[in-house]
Image: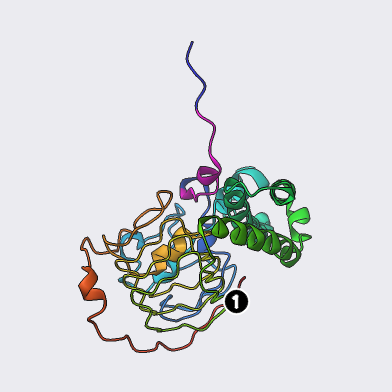
Amino acid sequence: MSSAPPAETWRERLHADCSRCFALCCVAPAFARSSDFAIDKPAGTACPNLREDFRCGIHTQLRERGFAGCTVFDCFGAGQQVAQVTFGGRDWRAAPATARDMFASFTIMRHLHELLYLLHEAVSLQPAGPLGADLARVLAQTERLTAGTPAELAAVDVDARRREAADLLRQTSAAVRGRGGPLGPDRSGADLMGADLRDVDLRRGSLRGTYLIGADLRGANLRGADLLGADLRGADIRGADLTGCLYLLQSQLDAARGDLGTLLPPTHTRPAHWPATHTATGDAGSRARPSRPARNRPARRR
């Protein structure tokens, strides 16, 4: 008798599968011409690089063509959930009447799936006492919301869901980081754009919602640090140690600059655009501090 296939893990389920989507991320969001996008694109309008088969015509050249923002976008599996479950496999081109609701559902679903990812990670950290039960309750509630109809999704108060989850995620972070010793520095929400943080000890610290755009973190020790919502666009993390980081998303790594010397959690993938070189420890302290980049701040998340 053949054994049943292994159950899909939460990380696999919350991983984008473009083959089961209808390129919703190429249509639903708006693009603003910037260092991340080469063009302006209104919400609900297909990117001109989108082909009829829902594939990107410049997928292998996105960074070179000025679409770095596309390479770091993560829908957390919301695309296939909306395409295959919410709308039962109907695509917006074949059924244009579904387009408006489908794009709106995708926006809400992506927020919910990102919350699911963070809540699942928090649960996997096994916090003790009532906190674990509260996390499981909110996780189950969020799971039920993702099964809703387009009308039910439209009625979801995403901000309220985020606020409820944020407090539990924060409590879990403090409890887990405290297991390894005293908590590290709290730089939550700090403006560290372009800051010189080479070789700085940030172990078990909080960088929640911190602006680290263009920061120099070469050789920094970030073991066990809370990176929820930290903006790592252009941050230099060559030779940095990110093992055990809490709430680290793959998209944050994709937006940063690392190398073979960057130590990552085993659950994350080394971005393909990182150079296959290793920055020696001595190099990290011998280079000039980077210039402070222009301010282009996203909404702050904590």
Residue 258 percent across, percent down from the top left: 32, 66
Q: Amino acid at mark 1?
A: Arg
Residue labelled with disc 1: 300
Residue 138 inside the magenta-drawn segment: no
- Give whichever of 229, 171 is nearer the camera: 171
Residue 26 percent across, percent down from the top left: 50, 63
Question: How is the model colour-coded?
Answer: rainbow
Query: Of helix, strand and loop, which mostly describes the magenta segment?
Result: loop
Residue 255 percent across, percent down from the top left: 41, 68
- Give whichever of 298, 236 is nearer the camera: 236
Q: Which residues are magenta?
A: 6-18
In the drawing, does residue 262 fall left or right of residue 243?
left
Asked whether residue 71 is in view, the answer is: no
- Give whichever of 163, 68 is nearer the camera: 163
Residue 32 percent across, percent down from the top left: 50, 79
Mark 1 surroundings: few (<14), some (14-19) or many (≥20) residues within 10 A:
few
Residue at 46% from the left image edge and 81% from the top image edge: 33
